[in-house]
Amino acid sequence: MATDTPTDTDFGQVSRTKDVAFRLLALAATLVGIVSLAALLANVAVDAVGWLNWGFITSPPHPDPYEAGFLPALVGSIAIMLLIALITFPVGVGAAVYLEEYANDGLLTRFIQLNIANLAGVPSVVYGLLGLGLFVGLLGFGYGTVLAAAFTVALLILPIVIISAQEAIRAVPDSQRQASYGMGATKWQTIRNVVLPRAMPGIMTGTILALGRAIGETAPLIMIAAPTTVFGIPNSFESKVSAMPLQIYTWASYPETEFQYGVVAAGVVTLLIVLLTINSIAIVIRNRYQQRT
Amino acid sequence: MTMSDEQLLSSDTESSDDQPAPTPGTDGLTDSTDIDTGERSATERTLLEARDLSVYYGKEQALDSVDIEIPEKQVTAVIGPSGCGKSTFLRSINRMNDLVDAAHVDGELVFDGKNVYDDDVDPVALRRKIGMVFQKPNPFPKSIRDNVAYGLRVQGKDDGDVDEKVHTALERAALLDEVEAQLDSSGLDLSGGQQQRLCIARAIAPDPDVILMDEPASALDPVATSKIEDLIEELAEEYTVVIVTHNMQQAARISDKTAVFLTGGELVEFDDTDKIFENPEHDRVEDYITGKFG
């Protein structure tokens, strides 16, 4: 009270019971996901202690759990990821630019748009089947090769890349395009000089987050007959390749408890570290891009 | 940039109807060059002329059979209430309306003796002769230097001394003194008024014939506005300026000619600015100018 002479005016009270109740409910909903994830991480991390070491990272798989290593699957996953990035980035951005900047808002465009959204929801095992028929069968990339795996999973995340790139392009203010067209720029000049630079951080974020989804995919790799265990690291696009989730899945089915807990946990932690590294790289690249503009 | 790029843009845009040009205006002149009418001086040349120009957005008519002759190297103000079609008129001059899918244009807009809606006119090439400044300052998130050089680069005029052209444009836009030391910093770091002058510098750097301005000062404070107004009067020594404004005092201060659009996209009166503001022919125009309407 600022005054020296307090009065006894009573403004009354408004009940906050529901306010408080809803707040707690919303907090609980928020915590369900976070707490269970944290519990899982803690559990896996504890199990991985003693198993996740330099030897595990740098050795090939072995029937003895104490000798088992993750190197071929680790390198295989990274090789597949790099190839996927090279495939999806140009194709995804190209499709997004076409849909946002060139295509008329007609029935055909809407039909394509609707189907891209639908493709993003198709189960990954279906993409595996497609990869088996198209890349392994028709195009002869070979069963379980780096090439077949990368193209199959690239197809899987392409709709996500396209949709996020479209959103980034749509977020470029129209006044910027107008300014460019008003200067006598062609459509291509406007896209290259104004739209893409401005949309690039968003496009890259979307692409890399999609890669994060790709790295955990197992079903399509099984469908294209990627070997569950490979002993050598891939040295060409035609090499047979395994990937981290596939190797982890295989170990989990072994009878020895050392595999089921220790080795699997070490694999999971490695997979998560690679995933977080990819995402961090994404954030760094995006921030650097944003500062330049 | 290749020819096919430009054709790509022109091919998906509206082409005008090939109807014969109706007789424009009250003075019955159809020749677009070297027209002089009673009240204008003999040296005056018409650079832009609309003949029975109508613009539709879908089924809605935004501009209704406009006939107007805009003189070279003068400031022509376009005034009128909101939704009267004044911005539509401006954007029909450099075919920015082509970018709107539903837009449809009838009639002719003759620029330097050529109907810009003829099939063989490339709107991208047209826009290289007609610069445009927008209502809200819209510099690119690039350096001041790159903003001004943008037109030069996209138009392939960046051989030779780009820096010198950038300096000249900034000087003409009365911005050079304020930014000379920071040409490599972002154009977005400037104040609103400076950004708008940067946009004007960007528009004049490739040396167009005409500068279109769509309410260029409406988002600015009074000091910045007065700087822009001074600048516009100076620009008219070298360029033909067409400015849309909703500010009647501004039109009275800076323009040589004034066109008054009223509701329905109709050009009601076009004359010397003094005449429009002191003794308009039409009662509706007088009502609008004196604030009884609009």
Image: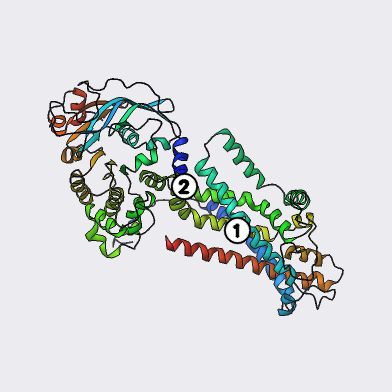
In this view of the protein, which residue sits in the foreground, B228 or B161?
B161
Q: Which mark is residue B236?
A: none
Residue drawn 15% across the image and 26% down it: B37
Residue A238 lies, with reference to residue A187, above or below; the image says below
Chain for numbered disc 2: A
How packed is label 2: few (under 14 Cα within 10 Å), some, or many (20 or more)?
some
Q: Position of residue B69 (x, y in %)?
A: 23, 30
Q: Is residue A44 left or right of residue A11?
A: right
The amino acid type found where label 1 is placed reads: Leu
Task: Answer yes or no: is residue B139 visible.
Answer: no
What residue sits right under mark 1 in the picture?
A209
What residue sits right under mark 2 in the picture?
A188
Residue drawn 63% across the image and 51% down it: A158
How far separated are the C-alphas under marks 2 and 1? 28 Å
The amino acid type found where label 2 is placed reads: Trp
Residue drawn 33% across the image and 61% down it: A1
Of callouts 2 and 1, the N-terminal one = 2
Residue A86 lies, with reference to residue A47, above or below; the image says above
Residue A262 lies, with reference to residue B217, above or below; the image says below
Q: Is residue A174 left or right of residue B209?
A: right
Q: Which image quadrant is residue B117 in?
A: top left
